[in-house]
Image (cartoon, grey):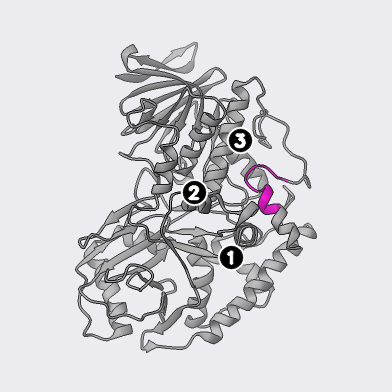
Amino acid sequence: MSRLKYISVVGITYWIWIVAASNVIKTKVAVLGGGMAGIIAARTLHEQGVQDFVIVEARTELGGRMQNIELGNGVNVELGPNWIQGLGEGATQNPIFTLALKDGLKDVFSDFNNLTTFDHNGPVSMDKELNAFADAWSLYLAAAGARVRSAQVDLTARAGLSTVGYKPRTYLDDAAEYYTFDFEFAQPPEASSFIASADNNNFTFLGFSSANNLVIDQRGFKTIALTEAATFLNASDSRLLLNHTVASIQYSSSGVTIETSQGVIQADYAICTFSVGVLQNNDVKFLPALPSWKQEAIDGMNMATYTKIFLRFNNTFWAESQYQLYADPSKRGFYPVWQSLDLPTFLPGSHVLFTTVTDRESVRIERQSNAQTQAEIMAVLRAIYGPGIPEPEEMVFKRWHSDPLFRGSYSNWGTSYPPALFDDLRAPLQARLWFAGEATSFRFYGFLQGAYFEGMNAANDIAGCLGGNCTAIASSTSNHEIPKACGETFLDEENTQAQKHLAEAEVTFLTSRCW
């Protein structure tokens, strides 16, 4: 077992490790976290000829936020990521879609226009409101690009919508806005960046494609992570350390020491792929404490929560459309989006309906009992479909915000978060400890492809260091490297193809590091 203690010498406190030698694992690279970023980082090390690494994962399996659960009728549903977003093709194919095709993952086109709309009185037309927001959204995306080109400061997404004339005034307007904005970013326009949200949208849905596919594979979305890991790990690979919860990370210019629930790992380099929510909540202790510029960058990024609540009934009584949108007259985002899995091309006969809530509603629901949540849900469904509908046989959802391994679902860029802070979020410490995940992706934050690219980038950096060519990522307030100049195009492995595709489409978006 290991023990972390401190001693004082001439008034200065030093942390030291007292370790039983038999519990120490020594390695070149420790990959912390077994989600998409961690798996792709390890795969990249393998491809670069670096075989001396370990993957440290707190759970009993790989996959990170890619988690599914089997319902009582044997149907598996996705608690975490559910969509392949922005499929693309050929040279501009989304790498997540590439993995899905390779593994024969079953997914179905998500038709957001296949929609039935309701309020507290039952069916209601929202065509006017949905069309108004769609028109405003197109203007919003163009205005964000113009704002960058004229070197104007960022605004909230709410202010950005207002600048193009969109001002929601009714609860139907609120529902229409939620369906496009909150349902994607998991936070409202008030909490989101005007420029970054537009950029984020365009690099996936124009850089790859506008298509979204819902994963319904009964092996689980995590299949693409597990099968990819199997390309470089064998069944009993000692480099895979499951059930190892990281307690602390000690870093210096000579290496990284990680204390876990099952012992200590000493590595020349480490890649920390923990969510920004975990880093914000101090669930892992850093020694020495993270420098102020790094902590500010972590705390400044939003960690959003996206909660899908699955209900299994004994029959199917709801609309036959893929989506149903509910507009609550008094509370925005109150069980607003519903999806049926009991459709001919999805999971026929499953009798499964699910609703999505986000942000503060997600947190509120996590804090109340399941019985309270079910009562609220059934009140909404009975307002839509009448009092005679049955209670569900089963209700399941994941409390992402409360889980100390995640502390939320994915990141969202707020308006007070300039690119200089992003540089600091992404920057390594002492050229030994790297940070990678969807939150460190400038173009694809919040997306699985962001985690994919960032794991690859960090591993390539470290492989270069091991080969004697260490080019650490820049931090604008640290001494690791000279940062890229304002106005310099920011292109690396994660977005070169997407940038090329956007250029061909004559869509101009963020190429500058300075807003």
Disc 1: CA contacts within 10 A as few (<14), some (14-19) or many (>=20): some
Residue 226 lies left or right of residue 478; in this view the side is: left
Q: CA distance from mark 3 to mark 1?
A: 31 Å
Whole-percent x, y for residue 454 in the image: 56, 41
The numbered mark, 3 or 1, whose residue comes first in the sequence reads 1
Residue holding disc 1: 210
Q: In front: 86, or 156? A: 86
Disc 2: CA contacts within 10 A as few (<14), some (14-19) or many (>=20): some
Of tags 2 and 3, the one toward the viewer is 2
State the extent of the magenta-drawn residues as a range: 490-499
Check whether the beta carbons of the residues at disc 2 and disc 1 lie within 8 A of each other: no
Q: Which mark, by number, is residue 194?
A: none
For mark 1, give the secondary structure.
loop
Q: Which mark, by number, is residue 99?
A: 2
Residue 274 lies left or right of residue 481; in this view the side is: left
Residue 375 lies left or right of residue 485; in this view the side is: left
The quadrant holding residue 477 is top right
Viewport quadrant of the N terminus: top left
Residue holding disc 3: 427
The answer to whether residue 299 is seen in the rendering is no
Disc 3: CA contacts within 10 A as few (<14), some (14-19) or many (>=20): many
Whole-percent x, y for residue 82 in the image: 42, 58
Height in image: 233 above or below 162? above
Whole-percent x, y for residue 499 in the image: 70, 53
Whole-percent x, y for residue 215 in the image: 41, 59
For mark 2, give the secondary structure.
helix
Q: In front: 498, or 166? A: 498
Q: Amino acid at mark 3?
A: Ala
Of tags 2 and 1, the one toward the viewer is 2
Q: Amino acid at mark 2?
A: Leu
